[in-house]
């Protein structure tokens, strides 16, 4: 694995790194290197090896095989004081701090730079105060560290790491106990410092934060590297499903353009002899976004009818990688898109008509629903309230013969699970019973 923005000698590198504790192998043949001026996020499920990897780099955990190099020096050849001048480690669980004020605690970050009997000078105090200012903990300076909340203590320990003034900062879940405001503030600070040349290696649980602020992500799984690259390269729905065991949508926020990860329940596993049902959804205006996500999470093969670019359902479909015709914003369904739509309907086991509104621009989508061999109609509202065609859409709708009429997306999903099609054996998740509160009439 390689990474970082710089081409000079890596600040930290590991080669064929193995780490074990009590006879249990925790890291397996890890290769890693990073230069200056970047944020590397370590991600993965609990127990994947993120904390172990940071501990091995910092020399807190001894490695059994392989090498760890800081600059040109082998980690094993460096004293603890020399290591502490090259990197600072902020633990996920800071030690108890009885008897220290917050300022005194931050000043301990200066110890690696002091002689054996030397005490902190004015310059050391200036550095400590600046670190506290950056982390918005300067008002805590005179307070006993034992009186701080968990989040406040964590920020003070981050200030201590900054006061250490090392070229590399190692952080193990640094924002786990922080509120949203301070999570964003801390990662914003790490981003600014990395842009100034600091190297940050951070184990992070929140994938949205990792995607937004990290230059590079290393995904660990069972002590091995599952992926290494940019957030876009690493955070794919397929990989997140395999490693984390959940369905995920990865997309650019239409509001911030930040890479965003949305998780759902565990994705259904399709066993041998079971088919993945194909479900086509006719929707628009946000009426189908949640349904699309639920269907993908359940393991269905999902397609969608023609949608305009920028429509909320189009954004959801793009995020979930659900295919279907796309139209320019505010344009009507064109003949080519309509024919493609009919092909998708013909290929589907089920067609779900969402509780969407119809105008002359998308009336063709409603007309296409008549081609469905098995139609589920979600009727949360009266169709008259959804008809903006002067009655033409209502006449088309009256001619439809849905196999199931229901009142919600949940009920529509349950219907596709409950009524198997002739000659098909679907995945186990599609064979559950109808919920007791369902209003579907089959």
Image (cartoon, rainbow, N blue to C red):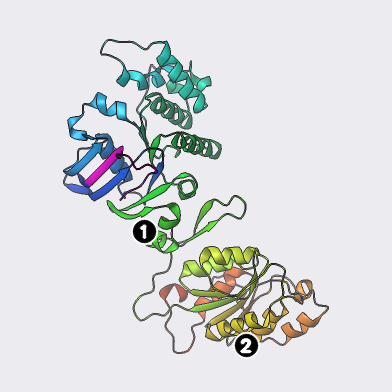
Using the image as rendered, state which of residue 162 and residue 43 is in the foreground. 162
Q: What element carries label 1?
A: helix
Q: In this view, does 88 lie above or below 430?
A: above
Does the image show residue 151?
Answer: yes
Left or right placement of residue 324 versus residue 63 in this view: right
Identify the residue at image location x=27%, y=42%. Answer: 13
Q: Quadrant of the C terminus?
A: bottom right
Tell me the number on the disc at residue 243.
1
Question: Outermost residue toward the front?
Answer: 7
Question: Outermost residue toward the bottom?
Answer: 423
Task: Specify few, some or many for label 2: CA neighbours under 10 Å numbering under 14, 14-19, or 20 or more.
Answer: some
Identify the residue at image location x=72%, y=82%. Answer: 397
Identify the residue at image location x=42%, y=69%. Answer: 268
Identify the residue at image location x=68%, y=74%. Answer: 379
Magenta range = 1-15
Alpha carbons under labels 2 and 1: distance apart: 39 Å
What residue is pinned by disc 2? Answer: 371
Residue 345: horizontal and vertical position, in percent?
58, 83
The disc, 2 or 1, on the residue closer to the chain's N-terminal end is: 1
Residue 413: horizontal and vertical position, in percent?
55, 72
Does the image show residue 442?
Answer: no
Q: In this view, does 355 lie above or below 167?
A: below
Q: Is residue 236 magenta?
A: no
Mark 2 and 1 residues: CB-CB less than 8 Å, in contact? no
Q: What element carries label 2?
A: helix
Using the image as rendered, state which of residue 297 and residue 8 is in the foreground. 8
Q: In which quarter of the image is residue 35?
A: top left
Left or right placement of residue 328 versus residue 247 in this view: right
């Amino acid at each position: 694995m390689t990474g970082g923005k710089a081409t000079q000698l890596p600040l930290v590198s590991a080669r064929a790194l193995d780490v074990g504790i009590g006879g249990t192998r925790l890291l397996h043949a890890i290769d890693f290197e990073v230069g200056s001026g970047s944020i590397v996020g370590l991600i993965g499920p609990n127990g994947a090896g993120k904390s172990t990897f940071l501990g091995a780099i910092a020399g807190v955990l001894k490695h059994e095989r392989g090498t760890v190099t800081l600059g040109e020096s082998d980690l094993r050849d460096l004293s603890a004081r020399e290591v502490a001048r090259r990197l600072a480690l902020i633990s996920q669980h800071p030690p108890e701090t009885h008897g220290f004020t917050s300022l005194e605690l931050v000043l301990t970050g200066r110890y690696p730079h002091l002689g054996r009997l030397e005490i902190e000078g004015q310059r050391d105090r200036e550095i400590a105060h600046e670190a506290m200012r950056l982390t918005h903990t300067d008002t805590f300076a005179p307070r006993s560290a034992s009186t701080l909340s968990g989040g406040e203590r964590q920020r003070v320990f981050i200030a201590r790491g900054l006061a250490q003034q090392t070229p590399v900062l190692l952080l193990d879940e640094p924002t786990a106990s922080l509120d949203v405001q301070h999570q964003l503030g801390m990662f914003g600070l790490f981003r600014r410092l990395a842009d100034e040349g600091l190297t940050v290696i951070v184990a992070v649980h929140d994938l949205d934060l990792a995607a937004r602020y990290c230059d590079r992500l290393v995904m660990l799984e069972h002590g091995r590297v599952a992926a290494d690259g940019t957030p876009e390269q690493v955070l794919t729905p397929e990989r997140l499903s395999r490693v984390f065991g959940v369905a995920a949508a990865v997309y650019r926020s239409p509001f911030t353009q930040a890479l965003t990860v949305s998780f759902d329940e565990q994705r259904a596993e399709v066993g041998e002899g079971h088919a993945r049902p194909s479900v086509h959804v006719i929707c628009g205006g946000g009426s189908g976004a949640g349904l699309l996500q639920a269907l993908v999470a359940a393991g269905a093969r999902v397609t969608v009818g023609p949608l305009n670019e920028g429509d909320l359902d189009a954004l959801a479909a793009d995020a979930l990688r659900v295919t279907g015709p796309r139209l320019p914003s505010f344009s009507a369904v064109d003949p080519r898109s309509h024919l493609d739509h009919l092909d998708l309907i013909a290929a589907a086991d089920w067609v779900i008509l969402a509780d969407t509104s119809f105008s002359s621009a998308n009336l063709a989508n409603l007309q296409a629903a008549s081609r469905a061999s098995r139609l589920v109609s979600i009727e949360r509202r009266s169709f008259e309230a959804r008809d903006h065609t002067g009655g033409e859409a209502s006449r088309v709708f009256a001619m439809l013969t849905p196999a199931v009429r229901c009142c919600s997306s949940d009920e529509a999903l349950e219907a596709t699970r409950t009524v198997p099609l002739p000659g098909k054996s679907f995945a186990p998740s599609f064979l559950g019973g109808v919920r007791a509160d369902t209003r579907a009439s089959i």
